[in-house]
Amino acid sequence: MMSTTKRDALSTVNNNNNDGNNGFKQRGGNCALAFDDDDVDKEEESLLVLENRKRKSNITWEDEDKIIIENHQHQHQRKLKNMRCDVEVRLKRDSIAKKSEVKKRVLEYFERSGMPTVRADEEINLDDSREEEDIVIALRAEELGPLWCGDFVEVLAFLRNNCEKIVTYWDASGECEGMQLMFCEVDFRIHVHEINEDGAGEEREDDEEIATYKEYALPCREFSEYWDSLYLDEGKKLRLKNYARTALEFGNLNVNASLVAFNRVVLLHGPPGTGKTTMCKGLAQKLAIQMLDTYSEPVFVEINAHSLFSKWFSESGKLVSKLFEKIQELTDDEDTFVFVLVDEVESLAAARKATGAEPSDAIRVVNALLTQLDALKEKKNAMVLTTSNVTDAIDVAFIDRADVKMYVGNPADAARGHILLSSINELKRVGILPPTKLEMAKDSNLFKDVVIATEGMSGRALRKLPFLTIAGMNRSMCDGPINDEEFLRAVREQAMNEKRERERLGANN
């Protein structure tokens, strides 16, 4: 049961912290201050208990002191964790609420729910009335009174009216999944944003038919599901996100890059179809949302490397320089952060030793690219993201400039299972498969057989598998939902067929 003093303290702290945006930039430890009085009461109660026990036993005062200290340390260990939780809040297009008010209400949502269950990438279902009912029952069970129940319903109604989506992202999510943390133990970072509905703008050189680059205003609708749709092994998403955060913090602190080398250049490499490009776009989207308080106009520039090779000899190097000069112009605006994507970077950064001793257009392109990267690293509001399928063809000087060189291979068993489940759930959403949950089926031997059958397939091939399976079943969408077991057997067979076709193609090559 929560005391009146504790409840009042919570309200006071939250009102103080939620006036404007600054309160939300402070660590969640501020919220823990609301519990200090209650903790003192608990400690006093412990002293009384120990005193009574002293009368009835032979416990010494030294033992009591030790017990008190250990209990006190244990109580505060969890509170001092302040597990970071980034809460991304996407506003509805017709929302008129101020961002500061939305932040306040989101924080109240977590406060009222009391003890949030920690899950990685958890989406709050604002339309599920059962969630409201369950939490209200829980609040009443804790004897928090009708006032808190009424407040929670009001908060939830506000969020439903103004928010399109709310998702929580926990640092070190693999370690904390399934844990429960008290409100005061969580360092909530609330990021309220509007989604950009416009598509890409294109830039062409003179009368060229092919655009040299595409420009997106972030966060954009096209990239909105990219990050969450990726299932990678060995914590690669977290590693990449932590690198990017550190690079941004170093830039904002004006760390001398001559003394502590960092270039804000990322190289993702591996076989085709493993999600490298998607990962770059998803990372840019995520960082753009979380840095809106600092950079209100983030943009994403996707370079078309093939368009930069001119039909006129020696012009390609000039085109590269001209393009990066435009990118530098974007960085002149202090409110803008520029993410630059160079897909298949080996096209621009081909190994110069392979071109021979004679000067060539390819060498000029590499030299121009390296020069521009060195100039761009002086800008704290820029990051270069690159991908490659053939790392052997990349110039060593470019590889040396990349801070992070991450291999992204074909998914392992667990990742393949997640990918297949996400595809199956989408088919259930649209009615191709029955709308029942797949909780039982995913633990079945049949589903495990499907996962084994897809070994060696890329993420892209796995995403295609459900479509190819349905297409091969020779049935109409009007025939009604397909039985789960029937579908899984067909997926397994289709996966084996795909493997055989790949082997034939490999033999022919």
Image (tube, rainbow, N blue to C red):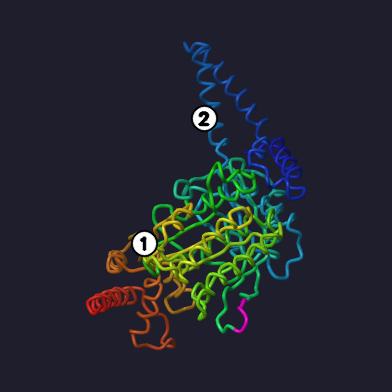
Where residue 195 sits in the image (x, y, percent)? 65, 67
- The disc placed on residue 42 is none
User: Residue 157 sits in which quadrant?
Assistant: bottom right
Rounded to the nearest angstrom, the CA distance separating label 1 from label 2 is: 42 Å
In the displayed structure, does residue 287 sit left or right of residue 464? right
Callout 1: helix, strand or loop?
loop
Seen from the viewer's position, the closer of residues 160 and 190 is: 190
User: Residue 480 sits in which quadrant?
Assistant: bottom left
Q: Which region shows up in magenta? A: 202-207
Q: Residue at x 66, y 31 (%)?
A: 36
Q: Residue furthest front?
A: 358
- Say whether marks 1 and 2 touch (CB < 8 Å): no
Q: Residue at x 62, y 70 (%)?
A: 216
Label 1 vs 2, first from the N-terminus? 2
The answer, for residue 440, to whether it is visible in the render is: no
Q: Mark 1 points at which residue?
A: 409
Q: Does the magenta stretch include residue 205?
A: yes
Q: Which of marks 1 and 2 is in front?
A: 1
Q: In this view, does 138 lie above or below 304?
A: above
Q: Is residue 138 above or below residue 71?
A: below
Q: Does the magenta stretch include residue 203?
A: yes
Quadrant holding the C terminus = bottom left
Where residue 508 sits in the image (x, y, percent)? 23, 80
- The disc placed on residue 74 is 2
Q: Is residue 134 above or below residue 187?
A: below
Q: What amino acid is found at the position of numbered circle 1 in the picture?
A: Gly
